[in-house]
Amino acid sequence: MSTEKQGSEGLFQPRPIKSAQLFERAARVIPGGVNSPVRAFRAVGGTPRFITRAQGATLWDADGNRYIDYIGSWGPMILGHGHPAVIDAVTKAAHEGLSFGAPTEREIELAEEIVKLVPSMQQVRLVSSGTEAAMSALRLARGVTGRSKFVKFEGCYHGHADALLVKAGSGLATFGHPTSAGVPPEAAQHTVVLEYNNLAQLEEAFALHGRELACVIIEPIAGNMNFVRASVPFMQRLRELCTANGALLVFDEVMTGFRVALGGAQSLYAQAIPDFAPDMSVFGKVIGGGMPLAAFGGSRAVMEQLAPLGPVYQAGTLSGNPVATACGLATLREIQQPGFFDALATRTRELVVGLLDAARGVGVPMCGDSEGGMFGFFFTRSFDDPLPQNYRAVMNTDKERFNRFFHAMLERGVYFAPALYEAGFVSAAHTAVDVCRTVESARDVLA
């Protein structure tokens, strides 16, 4: 029997022997032993947990360990795992057929539901991944405007298309440099990379390149530098500059869409900024309910530039897959229940406030933020440090303390994202008891 450690629920947490064996086996046939890099635990060290099943807000790994899940498949599982309405819809759809390569009525129903909930979108095209949706939105923006250059922000992740895998250049408003081998420099020559929430850089970029920009793509709340939100003044000025220069504003809501609010993050900015709306939006994760499904959309005038109506080509064999659309449609219908987002936001705030109180109580500097069912926290260098507003500030937080905290919490049956740079997610299945156990464990770990 493996060495065991007392868990936060009074359960024993064995060391991950089977997970380690599976990881070693996976490494022989899968690069790095994983099919998406963050799963490898390289940022925090140690052995990734191989999950065997999930229910509600709980995961079980190959060693039988039980965890409170704050990853939620990186955002889609807003209802929790195994929600009955979703399982019923998926099972029924699977019995009817896994894929047809032809249109189905359910694609229309899902598109109608998205358009109903997001006023800035009149038409939507379904695809299979967030990367595909962001890549297609960028191509469409270039096709509509006839321009090549675009702006992205350091710390925002829009998938792994070549032109989007770019880091900041060496000076203000310079063109970026590829962040991956295999991306040629010329693929990044039209990408202008700016610092998130930096108004001065934004103004300079538009002064230099405004009439050459096809679009600006932004995560309104960045989830891949932990949880960092764009300020209202920054977003308002960005909208003004895009409009004045004929560039399209593209909201990447792969994470935030139907996760931070029913109308996405754009609905929150619309409450603070008169007549605010992006020109195009990119969605994923929640709209698939855990199945591979994403979408991009905008006004009818923009979207009708896509093939087969217009000259901008985009296609996908499994786009609008009947099982995925059943899963997404069931999820979207459930989250429209009265009071759903109020309850979700309250539970998420309870978690973040509880963690901050636990840290403060033992003299550990920490800050955090949340919106809807999405949250983040940082271990800062001092109590005077503000919430990070950009990637540079995130990099200056205490990574070593986070890594120690992550492993200690994992041993107590609490599964946060295995990297400082990832946001966390709460589902409707998380209970007050889950949050209480999490906070109690954090207090023990930080003491």
Image: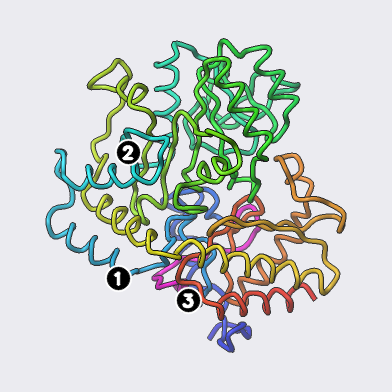
Amino acid at pointer 2: Val
Whole-number angstrom distance, CA of label 2 to CA of label 1: 25 Å
Residue lying at the far bottom of the rendered structure: 10
- At horizontal 79% and vertical 46% (from top left) the residue drawn is 396
Left or right: 132 in relation to 180? left
Badge 1 marks a residue whose secondary structure is helix
All told, the count of numbered labels is 3
Give SS at disc 2.
strand
State the image coordinates of residue 425 (x, y, percent, origin top left): 54, 60
In front of the other: label 2 or label 3? 2
Answer with left or right where residue 97 lies relative to residue 134.
left
- Judge from the rendering whether residue 361 lies leftward or rightward of residue 143; answer left or right: right
Instruction: Look at label 3 and name its amino acid.
Output: Asp
Q: Main secondary structure of the magenta part?
A: loop
**Structural crowding at the residue carrying mark 3, measured as other residues with C-alpha within 10 Å and reported as few (<14), some (14–19) or many (≥20):** some
Decide whether residue 89 is among the magenta residues: no
Front one among 263 and 40: 263
Q: Position of residue 79 (x, y in %)?
A: 41, 64
Pointer 2 with pointer 1, Cβ within 8 A = no
Q: Which mark is residue 63?
A: 3
Type of the residue with mark 1: Pro
Range shown magenta: 41-63
Question: Which element carries disc 3, helix, strand or loop?
Answer: loop
Q: Is residue 117 above or below residue 355?
A: above
Mark toward the viewer: 3 or 1: 1
Q: Nearer the viewer, residue 12 or 288?
A: 288
| Residue that mark 1 sits on | 84
Task: Name the mark on residue 400.
Answer: none
- In the depicted view, which residue is nearer to us: 38 or 423? 423
Mark 2 sits on what residue?
127
Q: Position of residue 390 (x, y in %)?
A: 71, 40
